[in-house]
Image: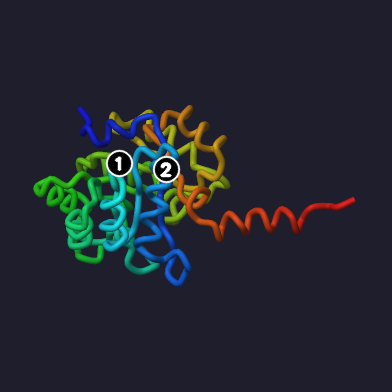
């Protein structure tokens, strides 16, 4: 039996609202406004990064907030320690997303130990996986949600052009857990394909909330056009 918050996302769109360091939109109140706009547009939940953003967004939306804390750029940097997970929860995250790859964790704990400690404090855990082996480890550890977030980024699988539907299908077939498709979902067709492959729900970030990337896609297309 899944938690009601996770049930509320089934068959729906989740929007990831994040900005990178140094970007004009890297401001908690800006992120909160974008999150609210996404909620009005039909988002069933918001995924966001950083304690200030989690807190600001939680104060603006009525849908569940999936929080994470990125620290560093190499190895495990998505909510890398139990301390980070606890802080995300205290900031207002309803669900905490954690790197669930099998790489060494900075605090020396195993992923299973982190999940156990989170559950003891009532924290729901979303496992950001990079391979089927990661998903097996995460499922065995008792994760509440599995996702394809890190497919193509952890060194175990090739980076697909769009979402890694092959991994998604493997995970859906093997585990009796909600499996979320996240990563490189750039078009409505990608999102539809993920749902048809069995995803519990689909998370879209860049294609909705990152205007720099979206502008770049259009600028490249315009520049490459063969004009008569």
The spot of residue 17 in percent (x, y) is: 40, 53
Q: Is residue 220 left or right of residue 166?
A: right
The spot of residue 18 in percent (x, y) is: 41, 57
Q: Quadrant of the N terminus?
A: top left
Q: Which residue is mark 1?
A: 63
**Rendered image coloring scheme:** rainbow
Q: Is residue 76 visible?
A: no
Question: What is the number of callouts on the image?
Answer: 2
Above or below residue 2? Residue 206 is: below
Say few, some or many: other residues with alpha carbon within 10 Å of mark 2 (under 14 / 14 to 19 / 20 or more): many
Q: Which residue is mark 2?
A: 203
Tell me whether the residue at label 2 lies in contact with that at label 1, contact meaning CB atoms closer than 8 angstroms: no
Q: Is residue 66 visible?
A: yes
Residue at left 22%, top 32%? 4
Q: Is residue 208 left or right of residue 8?
A: right
Residue at left 42%, top 28%? 198
Q: Is residue 121 left or right of residue 75?
A: left
The numbered mark at residue 95 is none
- Marks 2/1: CA–CA distance: 14 Å
Say few, some or many: other residues with alpha carbon within 10 Å of mark 1 (under 14 / 14 to 19 / 20 or more): many
Above or below residue 135? Residue 154 is: below
Q: Quadrant of residue 143?
A: top left
């Amino acid at each position: 039996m899944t938690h009601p918050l996770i049930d509320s996302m089934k068959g729906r769109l989740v929007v990831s609202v994040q900005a990178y360091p140094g970007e004009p939109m890297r401001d908690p109140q800006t992120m909160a406004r974008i999150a609210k706009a996404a909620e009005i547009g039909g988002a069933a939940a918001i995924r966001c990064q950083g304690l200030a953003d989690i807190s600001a967004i939680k104060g603006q939306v009525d849908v569940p907030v999936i929080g994470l804390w990125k620290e560093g750029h190499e190895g495990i940097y998505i909510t890398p320690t139990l301390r980070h997970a606890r802080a995300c929860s205290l900031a207002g995250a309803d669900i905490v997303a954690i790197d669930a790859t099998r790489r060494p964790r900075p605090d020396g704990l195993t992923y299973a130990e982190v999940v156990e400690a989170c559950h003891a404090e009532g924290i729901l855990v979303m496992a950001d996986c990079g391979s089927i082996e990661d998903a097996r480890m995460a499922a065995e550890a008792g994760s509440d949600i599995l996702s394809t977030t890190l497919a193509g980024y952890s060194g175990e699988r090739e980076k697909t052009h769009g979402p890694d539907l092959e991994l998604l299908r493997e995970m859906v077939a093997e585990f009796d857990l909600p499996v979320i498709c996240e990563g490189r979902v750039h078009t409505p067709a990608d999102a539809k394909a993920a749902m048809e492959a069995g995803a519990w729900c689909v998370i879209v970030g860049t294609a909705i909330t990152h205007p720099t990337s979206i502008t770049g896609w259009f600028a490249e297309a315009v520049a490459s056009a063969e004009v008569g």
